[in-house]
Amino acid sequence: MICCKNSENSYQKLAFYIPVFHYFKKMLPIFDPNDNEAGLKLLEDLTNNACQIQQQVLEHILTTNLHTGYLKSFLNGDSSRENFKNKVPVVNYEDIKPCIERIANGEPSSIISAQPITELLTSSGTSGGQPKMMPSTAEELERKTFFYNLLVPIMNKYVDGLDQGKGMYLLFTKPEISTPSGLTARPVLTSYYKSSNFRNRAFNRYNVYTSPDETILCPDSKQSMYCQLLCGLVQREEVLRVGAVFASAFLRAIKFLEEYRKELCSNIRTGRLSDWITDSNCRNAVSSFLSKPNSELADLIEVECSGKSCEGIIKKLWPRTKYIEVIVTGSMAQYIPTLEFYSGGLPLVSTMYGSSECYLGINFKPLSNPYDVSYTLIPNMAYFEFLPVDKDNKKVIQDVQCNGAPDHNGKQEEDGKEKDVEAVDLVDVKLGHYYELVVTTFTGLYRYRVGDILMVTGFYNNAPQFRFVHRRNVVLSIDTDKTNEEDLLKAVTQAKALLDPHGLLLTEYTSFADTSSIPGHYVLFWELKAQGTNDLPELDPITMEKCCSTVEESLDSIYRRCRKKDKSIGPLEIRVVTHGTFDALMDFCVSQGSSVNQYKTPRCIKSEESFKILDSRVVGRFFSKKTPFWEPFRIETNL
């Protein structure tokens, strides 16, 4: 056992939880989420004893899974922490992908997990253009339920009276597939909403929703959105908080409300649901809320929505609302100004930080400025390690291959030379430093690089707090899509081939996530010239529109799903700029401190000044006229 801060005092405080953790093999202490005092006490104990709990978590995971095929190949029967750190490599998805595909194709879970793998959770990240798949077990659903319950006492600490009404949370499911082995592969939230943990959840007076479960589980996203908004409007006087998981989804709901407000009001006025709502479960669930006509409510909603501007519309339609709960960290931060426009001054609250690999952290100060949100990692969710990132927050740790135990955890470049980088434990991270998160989970992931870059902002008791900075390598994101620089290059390369017959050359390009409209869309800035000259001839609109469509068709399945099925991303746009535009961009970057010798054209721009330089020189704008092909991904069987 390693030495932990305040170890004697910490062990005393942990005394109650040690037998609980060992008795319940899921390492989840039992508490009543309706008991705020008990919930806050539990959070104090978890954070005070972060070091000891982390060691218990690792011990439990290793002893439970020591004889799995994966760990057996590295540990040779020795489940000590030291052996784990020395012998088990830090890995990326490509390293473990063969193991997961073997399970998807019917081989036993014991390849990676002593517990049966019950489903595969598809990540927003991709591999070979398809979603990554993370293993999950039945007990992991209980861990998620425990995590959600921890949010309740925190919100009640900062906001009074949340048990006196309902939450209008707009929640949706995504498509799923069945693998050759019969396992279901689906997004993590779809998994939870369809589980008995959600559908048969114990009553919690703080989490009563306006949306019936049937509307959340409706496979048709349009019908689901309509019915959830309708139920939320009918129950407007009971609504105390509104939200969705991601900021982008909540803004789509506002846009949907603008487009369908007359029909929604007509349904409320007549007490009759529109005929195009054909999902029988939705119709039956919503019928109880439309049991009688309500002209007064319909008139009120029409008045509030009929103004020239929708500024403050949330507070107008749901006057008792205390806050908007959405994730606004990472790429979702780009939506904060738009949310503030619609909110009417309501706080924007990001409560939690999670991933397909596991749930991770909680915001202990939910009413903080949305740009300053930090998450405290909950130490019994997984075993956490951290790979240092350089002081300029550039991702420099190179991939570690899973072809045998390496003699290092990672490599970091410094002045062109490589040096060894060791992964540090949760309680050993340093204030102000940047790290990449590595997790060892209860479900069969060992020293897995999540790809999230975090900065340490402080400590709550002995548990560090982190600000989510960005995803490794991601350059563009509108919704749940995450396009990296390599995939963008491949897509642009496919599209620019269409220019060759016209004697055009693409000399430079960059990109921009345009969220000024709903839904947002990708914008590519292209600098073109005719072969043998710097002149730009008249552009053929049909060819340029085909270029837009080709880029979209070449992007990964999650982008294409967002475009085609979810409609959470708008048509891709190419803006052609004049000759010399990218020279002007370089001059600006150099004036801001970039080195001329080391300057590379950024493949995605973030700053308003850079955007203005490019946009002021646009001579042509073209949009994709086709929706890209998409269907749920398939796993080919090798059996």
Image (cartoon, rainbow, N blue to C red):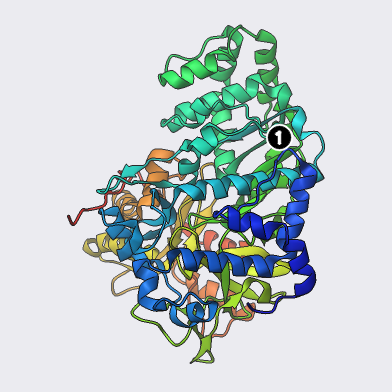
Please say whether residue 317 is visible from this viewpoint: yes
Q: Residue at x 46, y 36 (%)?
A: 194
Please say whether residue 246 is visible from this viewpoint: no
Residue 401 is left or right of residue 198, and the answer is: left
Residue 220 is left or right of residue 605, and the answer is: left
Residue marked by disc 1? 206
Residue 20 in the image, given as x and y percentages of width and height: 64, 54
Specify the quadrant that holds the N terminus.
bottom right
Quick one: label 1, few (<14), some, or many (20+) residues within 10 Å? many
The residue at the far left in this view is 639
Residue 532 in the image, given as x and y percentages of width and height: 29, 75
Residue 350 in the image, given as x and y percentages of width and height: 67, 49
Specify the quadrant that holds the C terminus.
bottom left
* Up-down relation of residue 133 to residue 248 (above or below): below
Q: Nearer the viewer, residue 315 or 292?
A: 292
Q: Residue at x 46, y 41 (%)?
A: 190
Q: Residue at x 75, y 64 (%)?
A: 48
Count the marks: 1
Residue 375 in the image, given as x and y percentages of width and height: 67, 59
Mark 1 residue type: Tyr
At mark 1, the secondary structure is loop
Q: Nearer the viewer, residue 502 or 136?
A: 136
Residue 115 is left or right of residue 593, and the answer is: left
Q: Nearer the viewer, residue 100 or 70?
A: 70
